[in-house]
Amino acid sequence: MTLKNRAKVAIAGGVLALGLVGAGTAMAVSGGDGGSVSGPDADHARAAAVAVAPGGQAGQVRAESDGGAAYGVDVTQSDGTRLDVRLDRNFDVLGAQPVGQDTGGGDGGDGDGG
């Protein structure tokens, strides 16, 4: 292998390594959204979330990282509707809304111009 070819291989390897590091960093910065939470933290989150919808059934607990939320809990209310309850690190409720609605921590606008 010539010196020129070795340089090309080294450069290509470096570019690949930088791409992998960049992808990993992007995933880490974008947060743990969707990561399942278990154990005592999940139990505390479920208990706090059910307080929002008495008689409801708490399901999956997810790690959140936007809008000040640390946890997201799916709660099925007694009438069958589902809520996404968002909690901070201390398990204080930040808000709840029907599953499927955007809960992003943006500027608070709904984007409909009105």
Image (cartoon, helix red, strand yellow):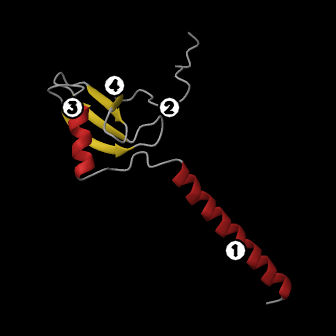
**Residue drawn 75% across the image and 78% down it:** 9
Disc 4 to disc 3, how far (Cα)? 14 Å
Label 3: state its secondary structure.
helix
Q: Marks 2 and 4: which is nearer the front?
A: 2
Lower position in the chain sequence, tag 4 or tag 1: 1
Q: Circles 4 and 1: CB distance less than 8 Å?
A: no
Lower position in the chain sequence, tag 3 or tag 1: 1
Lower position in the chain sequence, tag 2 or tag 3: 3
Q: Which mark is residue 98?
A: 4
Disc 2 to disc 4, how far (Cα)? 16 Å
Query: In the current view of this chain or complex, which residue is farthest to the top?
Result: 114
Residue 4 at x, y percent in the picture: 85, 82
- Left or right relative to 62: residue 78: left
- Left or right relative to 107: residue 96: left
Q: Amino acid at mark 1?
A: Gly
* Residue under label 3: 50
Label 4: state its secondary structure.
strand
Q: Marks 3 and 1: which is nearer the front?
A: 3
Residue 44 at x, y percent in the picture: 23, 42
Disc 2 to disc 1, how far (Cα)? 38 Å
Lower position in the chain sequence, tag 2 or tag 4: 4
Q: Amino acid at mark 4?
A: Pro
Q: Circles 2 and 3: CB distance less than 8 Å?
A: no
Q: Amino acid at mark 2?
A: Gly
Disc 3 to disc 1, how far (Cα)? 51 Å
